Amino acid sequence: MKPSWIKNILYRTLKETSFHKQYQLRHHIIGTRQEAERLLNEGEIIRLRTSLTIKPRVGIIRDEDSIYPDYVNLKATWLRYERFCINNDIPYGFYDIWANDWMEKAKDFDIIIGRVMTSPAEKEVWMPKIYVLENILHKTCFPSYHEIWQYEDKIKASYLYRLAQLPAIPTKVTNSKLEALRWTEQDTYPFIVKTKIGASSSGVIKVNNRRQAVRLINRVFGMGRKVQYSYAWQKDYWYVQEFIEDATFDLRIMLYDNYAFGFYRYPDKGDFRASGAGHFEKKDLPLDALQLAIHARQALNSRQLGVDMLYSESRHQYFIIETSLFNQIDTPRQLEVNGEPSYYDISNPDCPTLHKGAIWIQELTIRQIIEQWHK
C-alpha cells in the first residue's frame, strides 16, 4: 500500500492530465445536476418534525465542488443540505467562508452549515472564522468551534477521552523526548505509533522493538516525520497506543440526531489495520457497542459523531480507537440488516429500535440544527 502522501502527489498529477475528467465521470465522482438529483432521490425525504413559526435563513458552505463547469461532485455534503432546504421550504443561499467578505456576508444568514474537510490547512481557515461567527456575530454554526477543535486531531481528542473516562485504547502522549525515551525501556512491544492527523490508517506504525522506537523518536524530535499532508510533519510529539492483538475487526458507528448507523471493517490478510483496507460488512450492531457510541457523543458534546472501536476477545469489551465529526457518505444505505437499508432509533438509548429505511444522514443533521435554532 502506497503512503497517503504519495497517493496525494499522484492524484494531483492526474488532475493536470486530460484523463482526469473522464476518470471522475467513469467512477461516478462527478455528474450533472440531473444525475445528482437521481442519486439523492435514492434516500427518503426527511421532513421537519415541528412547524416553524419563524424560518431561519440558512447559509450553506460548499464542499468538494467539481472543477468542471456543468458538473457537481456527487459526494458533496452541500447537495444533501440543499435538498433538505428545498423539500422543507427553508430559505437558503450559499455562504463562501473562503472569501474576503465572509464577515459581511454572514449578516444574510441565521444558520451557517457546512462540512470541514480533513486537511489541517482547511481547519486553519475555519476555526478563527467560526469563532467570530459564533461568539461575536452570534450565528448558529455547524460545525461549532468546539466540534472543529477536536476534529481530525487524535491528540486533542485523547485529552477529552481521558477527561470523560471513556474506554479508549490505552494511549499515552508526550511532548518530551526524554519521557518518550524512558517509555521505550518500560513499554510492552509491539505498540502502535500514530500521527495526530491522517485518515485510512495513514501515519500508523506498529513498533516491534526498542531499536525501532528510538529511531522513530529521534526522527520525530529532530527533523520530524512525514504525514499524510506534504506540508505537515509529526514534530515534537509522541503518540502511542497499546496494540490489541486479539481484535479481528473494527466497528464504525455513526450517530446523527437520534439515529444510529454502522458497519464492520476488516483488515487485509497479514495486516492489523482495518481502516483503509476497503473490506466492509453491513449488519446489525451490538447493543453494548451502540450504547458506548451514544455515551461518547454525549461526553464529547458533538451533535454528530462517528465512533471507531474494536473488540478485545480476552478482555470482553469494546475500546474506542478514535472518533470523527464527519465521515465519507456515498450512499443512503449506511446500515443494512438482512440486505435491507436500516437504521436504529436511539431516542431511548437503553432500548434502541431497528427500522427499515435509506436515509442521507446529512439531512438528519441539518434538521436537528434548524429545530434547535427554532427552540
Image (spheres, rainbow, N blue to C red):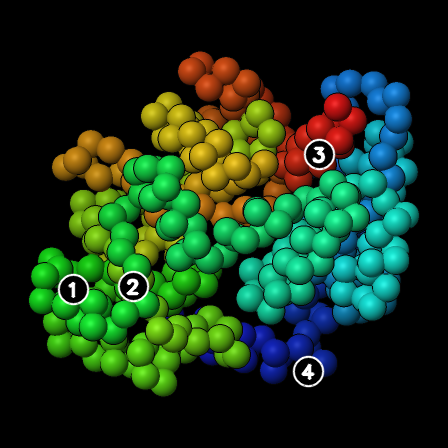
Please, what is the three-letter code of the amino acid marked with disc 4?
Glu
Q: How crowded is mark 3: few (under 14 residues within 10 Å), some or many (20 or more)?
A: many
- The residues tagged by marks 4 and 1 sit, at their Cα atoms, a distance apart of 46 Å
Seen from the viewer's position, the closer of residues 270 and 236 is: 236
Q: Residue at x 22, y 39 (%)?
A: 312
The residue tagged 2 is 174
Mark 3–mark 1 CB contact (< 8 Å): no
The location of residue 226, given as percent across then percent down, is 41, 78
The residue tagged 4 is 16
Mark 3–mark 2 CB contact (< 8 Å): no
* Sequence order check, earlier mark of 3 and 1: 1
- The residues tagged by marks 1 and 2 sit, at their Cα atoms, a distance apart of 10 Å
Quadrant containing the C terminus is top right
- Which label belongs to residue 183? 1
**Does residue 80 appear left or right of residue 202 in this picture?**
right
Q: Residues within 10 Å of mark 2 (few under 14, many from 20)?
A: some
Residue 252 lies in what quarter of the image? top left
